[in-house]
Image: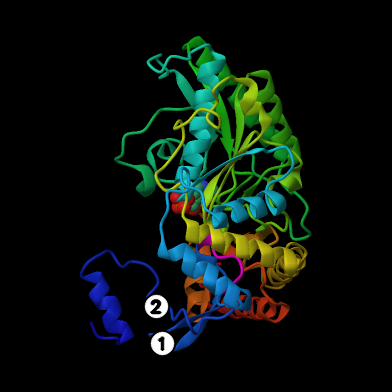
């Protein structure tokens, strides 16, 4: 195999689909918020962070300390089945995670590889809980009547159960068999350029609540049972759709009164991306189970004591939720180091400040140019909207030309997923590059 970067990519294409970015990343030379591309021998500003999964940039010095390198080496030389064979690195990771990431009141954890599987296991937790609530404790009891209530424009993954609750683009879930579970309106807030909610979000919430009540009534009339209400506290892939605390509280009440578990999918929003450990902490409405992934490296769920309302729940009874590896040890030690760095460098406060700076800058560009609207976000999770939607495609292409990698969100928005340690200088560079793209838009 030659090491000419373009040839490497061409050779790769002979064996697998290569439809991603036309770059070959130099992992040694990439640094901080800058991705070094070997093909063009240049650097791209990272406003996508590997789809919100790479939290503190490339080659953070904290990864290169001798003790850390030893830990990485040890963890990568043996691949143990963490759910059944425990080692010190696992114990240290779980201790750090539960101390700095898991909020109080969530004593149960489960680890797995992949965000879709994390969400899937949150759903399994709800199914098992609801089945037992209904008195079905024999493993051959029928449970096909259990369903998950979820939202339009939700993205929860592309695995078995999660495809039934994902509703972004049809290419992700079309032509695969799915369950017909209740899907309801998502009452998204829109923001003016001062940051105030500017749509009639209370009317949107009323519509959503009416649809939820209709879904519970329909389930009852058909002898079905809603085991869980599943929501991203902010929908990522589906359009950076923000919800008010009032609405999340309404979901909490439905879950309590109708005996369903409230499941949050924080795969994209969680682990300090919003400036708090979890996005739901901004809304102040506590869920029963939270699925996490991406920035956490190893994925999984944490759950409250509500799961203990039934005997033999999935965190007590062996093998009800499990996988051979129970997550990946290298991911765990990497997660632990990332978490230590987030705490040591106070990146939660840092990204809150930087995020506000970027949002303010985008609002000021929007006011001056009228190129986009609805600038919104928290911390590293930022989006803005184009009309017509085609202008969004042009903006992402123009940003790429100016060596910024940004993502689409929903039908008409651009999404930034920033490194938590993005510097003020790099944030200003990002804003300058956005501004310089505006004259290139032919459709806005
Ligand atoms: C909210 C949310 N849930 C679940 C997933 C699925 O995660 P994965 O692609 O790691 O399976 C994603 C991925 O983008 C996501 O954004």
Residue 290 at what x, y percent from top left? 61, 41
Q: Label 2 to label 1, Cα distance in Å?
A: 8 Å
Residue 51 at what x, y percent from top left? 51, 61
Instruction: Decide: few, some or many residues near mark 2? Use Cα within 10 Å; few <14, some 14-19, many ≥20.
Output: some
* Residue at 49% over, 76% down: 400
Q: Dot 2 corresponds to which residue?
A: 23
Circle nearer the N terminus (2, 1): 2
* Residue at 74% over, 46% down: 281
- The answer to whether residue 443 of the structure is visible from this angle is no
Residue 355 at what x, y percent from top left? 71, 65
* Residue at 39% over, 43% down: 159
- The answer to whether residue 398 of the structure is visible from this angle is yes
Toward the viewer: 150 or 278? Answer: 278
Toward the viewer: 218 or 315? Answer: 315
Q: How is the image coloured?
A: rainbow
Q: Which mark is residue 444?
A: none
Residue 81 at what x, y percent from top left? 42, 48
Q: Is residue 269 left or right of residue 14?
A: right
Residue stretch in magenta: 51-57
Helix, strand or loop at disc 2?
Answer: loop
**Label 1 lies in ligand 1 vicinity (Cβ under 8 Å):** no
Toward the viewer: 437 or 282? Answer: 282
Residue 16, placed above or below residue 426: above
Quadrant assignment for the C terminus: bottom right
Instruction: Decide: few, some or many residues near mark 1? Use Cα within 10 Å; few <14, some 14-19, many ≥20.
Output: few
Quadrant assignment for the N terminus: bottom left
Helix, strand or loop at disc 1?
Answer: loop
Q: Is residue 52 magenta?
A: yes
């Amino acid at each position: 195999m030659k090491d000419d970067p373009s040839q490497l990519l061409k050779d790769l294409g002979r064996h697998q689909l290569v439809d991603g970015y036309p770059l070959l990343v130099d992992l040694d030379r990439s640094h901080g918020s800058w991705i070094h591309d070997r093909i063009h021998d240049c650097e791209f500003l990272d406003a996508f962070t590997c789809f919100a999964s790479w939290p503190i940039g490339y080659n953070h010095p904290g990864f290169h300390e001798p003790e850390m390198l030893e830990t990485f080496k040890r963890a990568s030389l043996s691949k143990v089945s963490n759910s059944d064979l425990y080692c010190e690195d696992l114990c240290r990771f779980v201790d750090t995670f539960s101390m700095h990431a898991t909020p109080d009141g969530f004593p149960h954890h489960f680890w797995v590889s992949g965000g879709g599987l994390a969400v899937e296991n949150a759903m399994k937790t709800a199914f098992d809980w609801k089945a037992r609530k209904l008195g079905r404790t024999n493993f051959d009891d029928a449970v096909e009547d259990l369903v998950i209530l979820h939202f339009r424009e939700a993205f929860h993954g592309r695995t078995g159960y999660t495809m039934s609750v994902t509703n972004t683009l049809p290419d992700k879930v079309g032509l695969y068999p799915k369950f017909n579970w209740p899907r309801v309106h998502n009452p998204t807030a829109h923001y003016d350029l001062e940051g105030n909610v500017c749509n009639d979000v209370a009317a949107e919430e009323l519509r959503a609540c009416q649809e939820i009540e209709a879904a519970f009534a329909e389930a009852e009339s058909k002898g079905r049972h809603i085991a869980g209400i599943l929501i991203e506290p902010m929908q990522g892939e589906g359009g950076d759709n923000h919800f008010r605390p009032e609405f999340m509280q309404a979901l909490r009440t439905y879950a309590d009164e109708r005996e369903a578990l409230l499941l949050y999918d924080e795969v994209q929003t969680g682990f300090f991306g919003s400036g708090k450990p979890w996005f739901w902490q901004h809304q102040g409405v506590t869920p029963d189970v939270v699925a996490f992934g991406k920035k956490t490296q190893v994925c999984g769920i944490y759950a409250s004591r509500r799961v203990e309302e039934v005997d033999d729940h999935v965190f007590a009874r062996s093998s009800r939720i499990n996988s051979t590896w129970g997550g990946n040890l290298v991911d765990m030690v990497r997660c632990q180091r990332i978490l230590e760095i987030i705490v040591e460098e106070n990146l939660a406060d840092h990204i809150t400040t930087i995020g506000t700076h970027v949002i303010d800058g985008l609002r000021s560009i929007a006011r001056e140019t009228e190129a986009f609207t609805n600038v919104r976000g928290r911390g590293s999770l930022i989006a803005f909207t184009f009309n017509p939607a085609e202008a969004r495609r042009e903006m992402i292409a123009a940003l790429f030309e100016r060596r910024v990698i940004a993502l689409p969100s929903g039908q008409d928005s651009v999404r930034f997923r920033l490194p938590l340690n993005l510097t003020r200088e790099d944030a200003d560079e990002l804003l300058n590059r956005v501004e310089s793209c505006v004259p290139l838009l032919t459709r806005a």
